[in-house]
Image (spheres, rainbow, N blue to C red):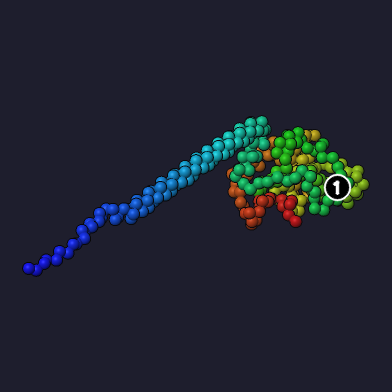
Amino acid sequence: MSRRTVVERKPKVIRNPKAKAKPHARATSAARANAKAKARAKSKTSAKSTSKAEAKAKANSKSTSKAQAKTSAKSKSTSKAEAKANAKRSPLAAAWLAVEKKRPHGEYSADLEPRAGLAYPDFDLAPLCPPEYTKLVRELGYRWVSGLGFLPPRWIKSESMAIGASGRAWQDVVNEREAGTHVYQFAMFASADLGDTNGFAFGPSDEGDEIVVWNIEDSLAESELGAFETWLAGEIRRLATSRGDEDEDEDEDDADAGDPLCLLAE
């Protein structure tokens, strides 16, 4: 009888697949958690950055609004000051400034010297200047617009020294002026063109002692034009209704473009 040999087999160990995957799953879970944490941190950083940017933008907006309000207040204050100043101006001064808004304009310095100085000893202008003129230049200074300019004091004297005396020999007048004994009859205070000593001068009227405006042509007093206020009102009307750019070839960027007398030219 034959013996059957029994071979013992080792029991098959069945491994739990879940148990095998645990280390990998843990790693994946940790990575996801880290990713989420980073995403939350990034989101918080972005939110903080956005908040800061918004806060900065709001601050800038407030600053801009304050600056605009300040500028507006300053502009209103300036407008009120100008309105107040204009309210105090004489009618002639206000009318002159209205013309300046339409034409090139400027102002000569009161101490501006003539290019060649004074040809003869100095003299007093006061007796020849009517109070209306004195008040105007005290308000506005020695101003010009294209078409007419008011000469500053030293220029008035210089141009007046070139005006002849009607009915008298020029050499006799020169001798008196050189000696400082001449009594000046005319003071040329304004002009549209100084060439050949043309312009407007104060002088005594032929009808009395009243100081009136005279038309000066080629260094001689030609005709009376009436009281200063009447003459200037007529000139302002002329300037207001005529073009402000006639006979002007100056550079528009030149601050003195339009100056009819070219007193500042080199």
Split into 4 quadrants, where in the image is the N terminus?
bottom left
Per the image, label 1 sits on a secondary structure element best described as loop
Q: Which residue is mark 1?
A: 168
Amino acid type for the residue under numbered disc 1:
Arg
State the image coordinates of residue 240 (x, y, percent, origin top left).
Answer: 60, 43
Count the labels in the image.
1
Q: Is residue 158 visible?
A: yes
Taking the view exactly as shown, the residue that stands out farthest to the front is: 1
Image quarter for residue 47?
top left
In this view, 11 is above or below 63:
below
Image quarter for residue 125?
top right
Residue at the spot 60% in from the left edge and 36% down from the top edge: 74
Split into 4 quadrants, where in the image is the C terminus?
bottom right
Relative to 48, 128 lies left or right: right
Residue at the spot 82% in from the left edge and 41% down from the top edge: 185
Residue at the spot 85% in from the left edge and 50% down from the top edge: 119
Q: Is residue 215 visible?
A: no
Judge the density around disc 1: few (<14), some (14-19), many (≥20) Cα neighbours within 10 Å.
few
Q: Nearer the viewer, residue 181 or 111?
A: 111
State the image coordinates of residue 171 (x, y, percent, origin top left).
Answer: 88, 51
In this view, 252 is above or below 156:
below
State the image coordinates of residue 114 (x, y, percent, origin top left).
Answer: 80, 50
Q: Nearer the viewer, residue 176 or 43?
A: 43
Relative to 17, 123 lies left or right: right
